[in-house]
Image: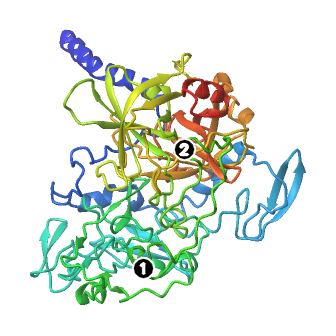
Amino acid sequence: MDLKLLLFCLFLAALLIPAELKGGKDKHKDKHDRGHERGHGHERGHGHGRGMREKKKYKFKDILEDIFFQIVDAGADEDEDDEDADWLSELVEPQGTCNPNPCNNNGVCKEKGRGRFKCDCPKPFKGKTCNRGPKVCRRGRCGRGECVLIATPPFYECKCKVPFQPPDCRRIALCEPNPCKNGGTCVRDGEDFDCQCPPGFRGRYCHVGPNDCYVDDGESYRGNVSETDDGKECLFWNSHFLLDRGVDPFDDFEDKDGLGHHNFCRNPDGDAMPWCFFRKGRKLFWDYCDVTQCPDPTGVAPTASQATSQTFTSGPKTTKVPPSPTPPTDPTYPPTKPSQTSQSSRPSPPSPTPSKAPVNPTAPPQEFPTCGIAQPKKAITRIFGGRKVSPGAIPWQVSLQVKPKGSSQSFKHICGGVLIASCWVLTAAHCIEPNKDMQVTMGGLSLNRLDNSSQVIGVEKAIPHENYRETPDAVYNDIAVLKLKRTGDVCAKETQFVKTACLPDAPLPDGTDCTISGWGSTEQSDYGSNNLLSANVLLINQDKCSESKVYGNVLDPGMFCAGHLQGGADSCQGDSGGPLTCPQNNTRVVYGLVSWGDQCGAKNKPGVYTRVTNFLGWIKSKTEGAFP
């Protein structure tokens, strides 16, 4: 008996120890990788992918297991978020003065000396800068349903997950009332159901009609598709999960570009086709939708009587999709499609800051004469909580991809990077793998599809920092440069979607609002996105981050901490080696590189980044005169 027990213990040890060792190593390599689900891009190739594999059916048990749909006492955690909501803000200790007033929502600013300030917030607003309003969508408030924000009391509404019924989404009624639209038949399958749709109709609820399609890039699409191409259910555009607390979604974006209180796919930012946000656990993602392109584009939006005038219900409440949006009043949201205006009706971007390099009239034209100025096709300024990147908004973002040296295998994304010159990319040293062929892609938003804006360039040489090292507690000198292969006189070519980020020329103050970006999907990760995501983070005071309850004395001057005031859904979305960019001199500078961290969005454990200002001399010495 003892021998059997011993053999069983040895078997368990053989399984668990290697995983434990790998997890320990990965802990310091990428705080943004942990907790992600493996993306679906690599097995789908570069096509759109619809129909290439069976969609996962959303089942009754999935609703029961979803953390957002757990049945809890709505008042049980009234202070759950408030208690820790400003933990990171306390670490940041934002610097600045009261002119201009940093306090939101008519908060009164009081200077405290030493470049510090305090905001006295009017009720009901809270937070270091009075940025947090009343939270009406607390956990458990909608039972087995999604809580969405509305403009009138009680300022929220519950969208129940079928078969759960309004008003509190706790009562089950399977097929009664019939959730299937347009004459669809509801067929029971235990606690689940299927809709058998009449000819020409599709979708989980038969709510997508035969004329439901999009033309051009789908900016005019007003149909009823509400699933991604992999069958993920879209979030409502006014979901509390998408929006910052205290934001009035209707004041901000209702009916602009077809957005509003529904979860139908739209294209509000000039992307390639309609898309939507969806959720996995507490993480926010986006993807293109399972929507059909009209077979014979005429340049006129489809009338789609079935698609634009039908109703969609969740229980007895009915929402009607308007046949056309309210004409936008914001000049940055023209009512015509980009292809019709050729961008001519939009305000011109600000003139780029001239390069500091001396002008030589006999020299050939310089590639990337400016840096740090993006020209996004169309920013989604009204989706405050969304972390989707608009085309051209982060044109210096790079995907670093590898395959075994000399093999015929496909390249796979492992890290992020940032373009700093036509032939040079900055990334983290821990991303450099020996005996691998390397390439970078830039200009696109997706890992699983190449479009006309994408550029794919081979890596000629990888140069990690000579003093790069890992310890059980931290990663030091985590920086590398990649020399790209030339085609003629250049490597990367400047376009609206491919530009360089500037190098910083001075330290930035604590509390500066910066941006991280990446796909969060690597060979080691098992929870990521195929589509580029971004998040806002604040630079954190170095002394605060070096306190014993945070990271202690393991930080050196080549590192710094940054995080997001609210933590949570958007605090882990980025890749190792990817850029942390900040505003400086009217441009965006690459101030940091995603490096390491302990856990992901946990209290007192913000992300740690390579401090680029400490390595400016090293970068310039390795890039062969690319910088003056």
In which quadrant of the rendered view does residue 402 lie? top left
Residue at numbered disc 2: 366
Q: Nearer the viewer, residue 527 or 296?
A: 296
Is residue 260 visible in the rendered image? The answer is no
Q: Which residue is rendered at x = 68% and y = 23% of the image? A: 553
**Residue 76, percent across and down?**
53, 60
Q: Nearer the viewer, residue 42 or 283?
A: 42
| Neighbours of disc 1 within 10 Å: few (<14), some (14-19), many (20+) | many
Farthest residue toward the left?
A: 199
Colouring mode (rainbow / by chain / secondary structure / one colour)? rainbow
Q: How many marks?
A: 2
Give the number of the disc on residue 258.
1
Q: In this image, 58 relative to 260: left or right?
A: left
Label 2 to label 1: alpha-carbon separation? 42 Å
Q: In this image, 430 relative to 189: left or right?
A: right
| Neighbours of disc 2 within 10 Å: few (<14), some (14-19), many (20+) | few
**Residue 98, percent across and down?**
85, 59
Mark 2: which amino acid? Gln
Is residue 566 visible in the rendered image? The answer is yes
Q: Quadrant of the N terminus?
A: top left
Q: Quadrant of the C terminus?
A: top right
First-in-chain label (2 vs 1): 1
Is label 2 in contact with label 1 (beta carbons under 8 Å)? no
**Up/down of 518 relative to 72, above or below:** above
Marks 2, 1: nearer the viewer: 2
